[in-house]
Image: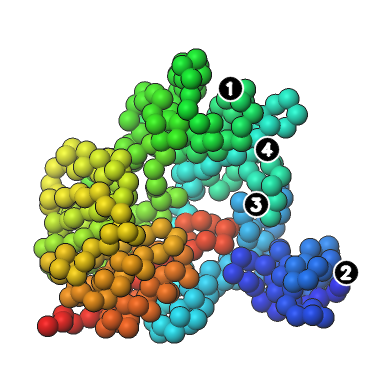
Amino acid sequence: MNEILSVDRLGQRGDGIARGPSGSVFIPYALPGETVRAVVDGERGQLVEIIAPAESRIAAICPLFTRCGGCAAQHMAPGLYREWKRRQVVTALEHAGVAAPVGDLVDAHGAGRRRVTFHARRQGEAMVAGFMAARSHELIAVEACPVLAPGLDRAPAVAQMLASRMGGAGKPLDIQITASEAGLDVDLRGHGPLGDRLRLALTQLAERLDLARLSNHGEIVVERRPPLQRMGKALVAPAAGGFLQATALGEETLAELVTAALPKGRRAADLFAGCGPFSFRIAERMQVTAIESDKAAMLALAKGFGATPGLKPIATETRDLFRRPLLEHELNGFDVVVLDPPRAGAEAQVRRLAASKVRDVIYVSCDAGSFARDAAILVAGGYALEAVTPVDQFRYSAHVELVGVFRRGRKG
């Protein structure tokens, strides 16, 4: 049904929310204060025409905006954009019943995203590499992306060449490309095990494309140069296909917030530590026990530590903190616990923290909802949420990171 609607506010995903005949209607790319014409189907609306634009509407920086699904907010003026992202954190805490001061959004886009995943699908006789369309399974070929760091300028062409070479099986592929100090680090997903002929062909193609490293499902095909990333004083080669913060400035910003909140003390635990972006920086001041379920990440961290002088000791442990969270007696020896869990949060571990004697907890999160749930558990266990800082390293997307600082007096 074609309706003329007035947009009242923004939703969590960046949709404009209007009041329709049957309730709220979510209209992608509409902004508060606008009068729009939309085709309405239940609570979803498709924007047809902007009858009266808002003053907060600006021109998008990419010609593929609204077609490509990677960006949701290129049309928002900076003030509206910052408040929309900050409001996501405020709202999540309010819903969880947690009172806390939430700071202004910190811009951590920097030079752009240093990691990107291209999808490759067969279209006719050829494999095409690109991004998925907004709210669709349609693939859009891309030649360039304005949110990527300069080190990824070649990434679209590299993804296309790899997709073409692997297209014989006709399988959908994901091609993750990371900019490193040694060049491009590529991990392929979706093909399954490689035969000898394809492995040799990919090795030759990696040489021709001058890749630092090429891996398949995290298994190294060829490493021509270690794909090093700087983490504080350390140079680290992350595990093939392993986790890395989206932007270099994002990692630096989160780490600065973590280290600024460290209390005086000797021992810190870094939980869900990855390959050590926080561990290395904390170890400039305190001994660190880094715990992570990914063995390859722990090996990368240990290797980076072994090559970096001037740090306090870093011990590593491979452990699934979802199934085997640290127990109270294990936690009580630490002066501070830092944790950076996946999007699902760390409920099992947080419940143990709430029952422990640990005085300071610094929680890095990529999901405001799971953070708010876990924050409520910590607050109920006697912590005060002293500060929350939203961090924006996924510019133009609906994602927001944050750092929360919890403190309390010691028990017992």
The residue wearing badge 2 is 1
Q: Mark 3 Cα within 10 Å, few/some/many (few <14, many 20+)? A: some
Q: Quadrant of residue 366?
A: bottom left
Alpha carbon of mark 3 to alpha carbon of mark 4: how far? 12 Å
- What amino acid does circle 3 point to? Gly
Kind of element beneath mark 2: loop
Q: Earlier in the sequence, mark 2 or mark 3?
A: 2
Quarter of the figure with the N terminus: bottom right
- What amino acid does circle 1 point to? Arg
Can you name the residue that lies furthest to the right here?
2
Residues at marks 4 and 2 touching, judged by CB atoms closer than 8 Å: no
Q: Position of residue 171 (x, y in %)?
A: 61, 32
- The residue shown at (42%, 74%) is 373
Q: Position of residue 214 (x, y in %)?
A: 43, 28
Residues at marks 3 and 1 touching, judged by CB atoms closer than 8 Å: no
Q: Earlier in the sequence, mark 1 or mark 2?
A: 2
Please, is residue 315 above or below residue 366 in the view?
Answer: above
Q: Earlier in the sequence, mark 4 or mark 2?
A: 2
Please, is residue 238 above or below residue 215 in the view?
Answer: below
Q: Earlier in the sequence, mark 1 or mark 4?
A: 4
Alpha carbon of mark 3 to alpha carbon of mark 1: how far? 26 Å
Residue in the foreground of this view, choosing between 242 and 36 = 242
* Residue 141 marker: 4
